[in-house]
Each structure stands twice: as C-alpha cells, then as structure tokens.
Image (spheres, rainbow, N blue to C red):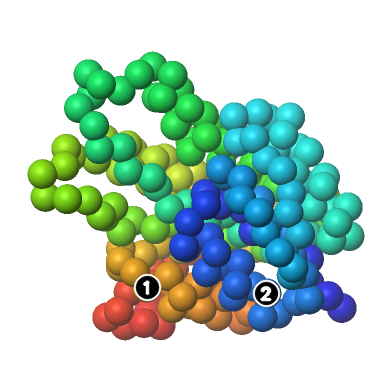
C-alpha cells in the first residue's frame, strides 16, 4: 500500500533533501514550502500560510484529500538568519519572522497531532538543523536563527515528552553539521523506515562522528 507522505518546511536545501529522500519511497508526495516555490512531479504542491491557524487546518485536510491518508508528516526547520543591527529591524519584519517561523509550527503541529490521533497510526517527525548560518566575518551577529531553532526544539521536546500515550510515533532529529543535507536526510529516513516503536519519543542526533549514533 502506498505511503502518504507530507513534507513541510521553509524553502531551502534541507527541505528539498528530505523531500527527495522521501520521493525514493513513493510515486508522489505532498509538499508545502514557505515562501512558496514552484514544484514538479513527484511533488504535489499544497498552499500554507504559516501565520494562519485556519491555513494549518486547510493544509492537513488538503494533504489527506490528495494522499487519501497521512502516514508520515515531516516538519523541517532550517532557521533563517537575521544579520542586522537591531535598530534597523522593522516591527513588521519581526512580526513576520515570529509568525512564519515560530507560531506557524505550533499551529501545524496541533492539527497534525489531532489528525494522527484520530487515525490512530502514523509518524510525526520534526527535523531541525542547528548548523550555524553562514555569513561574512564582518556581518552582524545572527539575531533570529538561534531563537527560531530554540523555539522549534522546545516544540519538539514537548511533543516527545507527551507522546508516550499517543497511538502514533513522534520522532525528532537534529544536526549541527553544515552542507551535509543529503546524508542527514538519508539518516532521517533510515530511522523512519525502521518503524521501531522504541525510536518514538526520542531525539536522534546526526553528525559526521558516529553517523548512525542516536
């Protein structure tokens, strides 16, 4: 039976690497990127406005309609950098970053947990890159990337801690490696494919030292 896979993430190499790895297992899968980008088969594009809780519900319903069921929902967070003097950052820019990269994950996770509990099966995977954002030596310090990463990690930690009573698997992944997206994606799917209940509720850390360590 075909697996229903949904991959959601901010547009970038890690989200694409996860989606490409997932595509090795199915003929088509649903993806939602922000900001939106054009995609081609085997990807089925879905719209998502992270700042809207209504959009989160619509995204999950849309994935269920396109895929018939959600077996795996993979949330991919590669935090963007904000290298500016704080005085030069507009309130609108801060609001947008908070809405899209922090609140949006909470809205979406809420809908996915509800859907997977109703189905009493499936996998929710939260994939985080904690690799330092690249910049020039004279650039200001990154004001936002670490904040977004910490918020996503806190969300994942809370979901892991409460997952013991859930009828579906909750997995979390992290890496601090730079430029190793393909190998990280393969590691993520190695754990997902194992379908081992003992992996649920745990962090799985990827690194070049001990590639398959957990």
Q: Residue at 39%, 40% (x, y): give it.
A: 148
Q: Can you say whether 73 is above or below 90 in the image?
A: below
Q: Is residue 162 visible?
A: no
Q: Residue at 74%, 49% (x, y): give it.
A: 46
Label 2 vs 1, first from the N-terminus: 2
- Which quarter of the rendered picture does the N terminus lie within? bottom right
Which of the 4 image quarters holds residue 27? bottom right
Q: Nearer the viewer, residue 208 or 156?
A: 208
Secondary structure category for the residue under label 1: loop
Q: Residue 174 location in percent, x, y?
A: 40, 62
Q: Can you say whether 187 is above or below 32 in the image?
A: below
Q: Residue 170 location in percent, x, y?
A: 60, 59
Q: Residue at 24%, 32% (x, y): give it.
A: 84
In-image side of 6 versus 77 (left or right): right
Q: Nearer the viewer, residue 200 or 41?
A: 41
Q: Is residue 25 visible?
A: yes
Q: Residue at 75%, 76% (x, y): give it.
A: 26
Q: Which residue is mark 2?
A: 23
Q: Tell me the CA gap for discs 2 and 1.
A: 18 Å
Q: Residue 211 location in percent, x, y?
A: 36, 82
| Disc number for residue 168 | none
In-image side of 156 versus 137 (left or right): right
Q: Nearer the viewer, residue 81 or 61?
A: 81
Secondary structure category for the residue under label 2: helix
Q: Which residue is mark 1?
A: 180
């Amino acid at each position: 039976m075909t697996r229903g896979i949904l991959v959601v993430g901010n547009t970038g190499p890690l989200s694409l690497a996860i989606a490409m790895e997932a595509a090795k297992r199915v003929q088509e899968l649903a993806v939602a990127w922000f900001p939106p980008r054009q995609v081609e088969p085997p990807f089925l594009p879905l719209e998502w406005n992270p700042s809207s809780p209504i959009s989160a519900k619509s995204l999950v319903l849309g994935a269920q309609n396109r895929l018939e069921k959600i077996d795996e929902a993979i949330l991919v967070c590669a935090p963007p950098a904000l290298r500016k003097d704080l005085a030069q950052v507009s309130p609108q820019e801060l609001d947008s970053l908070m809405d899209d990269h922090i609140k949006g994950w909470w809205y979406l996770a809420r809908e996915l947990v509800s859907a997977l509990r109703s189905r009493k099966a499936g996998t929710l995977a939260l994939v985080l890159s904690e690799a330092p954002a690249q910049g020039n030596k004279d650039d200001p310090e990154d004001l936002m990337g670490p904040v977004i990463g910490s918020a996503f990690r806190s969300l994942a930690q809370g979901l892991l801690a409460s997952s013991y009573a859930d009828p579906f698997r909750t997995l979390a992944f992290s890496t601090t490696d730079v430029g190793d997206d393909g190998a990280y994606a393969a590691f993520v799917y190695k754990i997902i494919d194992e379908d081992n209940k003992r992996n649920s509720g745990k962090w799985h850390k990827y690194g070049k030292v001990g590639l398959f360590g957990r």
